């Protein structure tokens, strides 16, 4: 597969580049997409990704890179990802989208794009996290009505969005099982006096140092509680999952896909 990688200088872009180089039987990297004005534009992607020689350059011309590829992996910014998505639509290329923090308007545009191309929107490309999603669904179906549900997520100090995309997806799963909209039942942090609102989902976001991605899902009941925690020790796991995701999209019909479909869940 001829692969284009967005934001190869970014944390995830570097890892996707390195993992794709290891999987030469699956991937031929044809180019990276970077912002205009960066000193690594026009240079081999190894300069941006700080890795071994790639044999493909980083460009600031989004359409040029997309047109050369069979598909794109994007972990960039919301604005950059939207530009990539529009180019993918123009050239009919599948898109594995790991970027988070989209507005409702941007999500609506992505859904419109998915009428033309297959898009995998994955807030988390870890196999283990996607299993946690299924556990969250099962617990909510079983004890959701008798539990106070809290979501605690921790990330490094450089993460821009809060809560994380993964924690929002957890909340959407829980709210969906209960026939609710997350926006109607989410409480983000607490301050002051007052009882906890029944049936609401509490969110707590920690940003400090270089903490790796950590998510804890808590179901509190009378006399007992269940805590499910996922900790990531190696972000290479997410890069591997992203590459599995773009391979999954090959030959798929246009629509929005979820990562659980990659895993056959």
Image (cartoon, rainbow, N blue to C red):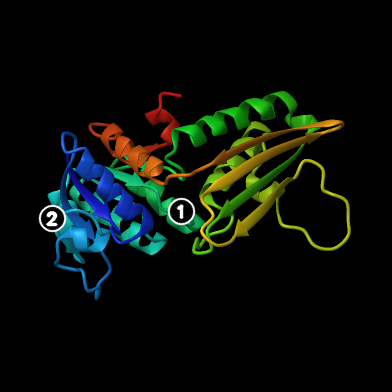
Task: State the image coordinates of residue 228 (x, y, percent, origin top left).
Answer: 64, 35
Disc with the residue nearer the chain's start (2 vs 1): 2
Residue beneath label 1, please? Answer: 100
| Residue drawn at the location 30% of the way across and 48% of the way down | 16
Indicate left or right for 117 with 238 as reference: left
Task: State the image coordinates of residue 129 (x, y, percent, origin top left).
Answer: 51, 36
Local crowd at mark 2 within 10 Å, few (<14), some, or many (≥20)? some
Name the secondary structure under disc 1.
Answer: loop
| Residue drawn at the location 25% of the way across and 52% of the way down | 5
Q: Which mark is residue 155?
A: none
Task: State the image coordinates of residue 184 (x, y, percent, origin top left).
Answer: 69, 49
Residue 89, visible in the rendered structure: no
Residue beneath label 2, please? Answer: 56
- Where on the picture, by quarter, is residue 118? top left
Indicate left or right for 78 with 215 as reference: left
Name the secondary structure under disc 2.
Answer: loop
**Of the pair 162 and 103, the residue shown nearer to us:** 162
Q: Are marks 2 and 1 in contact (CB under 8 Å)?
A: no
Q: CA distance from mark 2 to mark 1?
A: 27 Å
Relative to 241, residue 72 above or below: below
């Amino acid at each position: 597969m001829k692969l284009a990688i967005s934001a190869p200088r970014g944390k995830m872009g570097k890892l996707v580049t390195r993992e794709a180089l290891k999987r030469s039987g699956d991937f031929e990297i044809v180019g990276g997409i970077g912002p205009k004005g960066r000193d690594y534009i026009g240079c081999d992607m190894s300069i941006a990704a700080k890795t071994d020689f790639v044999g493909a350059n980083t460009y600031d011309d989004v359409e040029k890179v997309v047109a050369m590829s069979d598909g794109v992996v994007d972990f960039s910014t919301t604005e950059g990802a939207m530009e990539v998505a529009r180019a993918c639509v123009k050239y009919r290329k599948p898109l594995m989208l790991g970027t988070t923090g989209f507005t409702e308007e941007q999500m609506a545009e992505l859904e419109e794009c998915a009428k033309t191309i297959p898009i995998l929107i994955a807030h988390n490309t870890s196999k283990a996290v996607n299993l946690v999603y299924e556990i969250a669904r099962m617990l909510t179906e079983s004890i959701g009505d008798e539990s106070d549900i809290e979501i605690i997520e921790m990330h490094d100090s450089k993460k821009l969005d809060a809560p994380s995309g993964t924690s929002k997806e957890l909340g959407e799963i829980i709210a969906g099982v209960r026939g609710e909209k997350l926006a109607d039942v989410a409480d983000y942090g607490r301050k002051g006096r007052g009882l906890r609102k029944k049936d609401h989902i509490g969110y707590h976001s920690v940003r400090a140092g270089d903490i790796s991605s950590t998510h804890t899902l808590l179901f509190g009941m009378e006399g007992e509680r269940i805590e499910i925690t996922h900790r990531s020790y190696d972000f290479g796991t997410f890069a591997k999952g992203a590459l599995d995701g773009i391979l999954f999209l090959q030959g798929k019909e246009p629509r929005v896909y979820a990562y659980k479909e990659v895993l056959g869940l």
